[in-house]
Image (tube, rainbow, N blue to C red):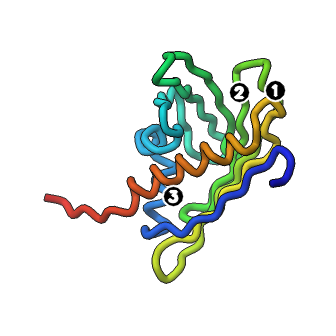
Amino acid sequence: MKKNTVSLHRIIQASPEKVFRAFSDPIALATWLPPYGFLCTVQQMDFQVGGIFKMTFINFSTGNGHSFGGEYLEITPHVSIQYSDRFDDPNLPGEMITTVSLNKVSCGTELVVEQTNIPDIIPVEMCYLGWQESLEKMKKLVEPDIPDA
């Protein structure tokens, strides 16, 4: 792994539109983004270029949380999202950049996520593990095709 960078690649059996909605809907995002053992509250989410977001991950075991937020830098519906991320904790300095790419493939969506400039105090392998868990949760949200009753 590159220093302070994680990259993930998945094939998701859902349309790019549905996967994009998982990133753009605050309730959906709060459902799948926190890794196992964490809850998420979304305080603000203005999903447009220049819009900002603010959320908190809460450790379910301890009740302790860490808040972070950022700005949406680029959005191409159903194709790509890029956003900045800053932790409120001064011990986690710097600004991370996350780029999400969606590509329609025969069986759904090719998803590529790259997060750069992860603070030195966070082990990159733990960040990678967290993203793996999050994407597994996201797949369980978007892959079922449940018709309206």
| Amino acid, disc 3 | Phe
Q: Residue furthest left?
A: 149
Q: On the rendered structure, is 61 left or right of 118?
A: left
Distance of mark 3 from mark 2, alpha carbons?
A: 24 Å
Task: Tell me the quadrant of the picture where the N terminus can be found.
Answer: bottom right
Read off the residue under disc 2.
87
Read off the residue under disc 1.
93
Between circles 1 and 3, the one closer to the viewer is 1
Q: Is residue 93 above or below residue 26?
A: above
| Amino acid, disc 2 | Phe
Read off the residue under disc 3.
20
Distance of mark 1 from mark 3, alpha carbons?
A: 29 Å
Between circles 3 and 2, the one closer to the viewer is 2
Q: Residue at (70%, 21%) from the top-left corner?
A: 88
Tell me where residue 8 sits by quadrant.
bottom right
Q: Residue at (81%, 26%) from the top-left corner?
A: 93
Task: Tell me the quadrant of the picture where the C terminus can be found.
Answer: bottom left
Tell me where residue 53 sits by quadrant.
top right
Q: Residue at (73%, 49%) from the top-left corner?
A: 115
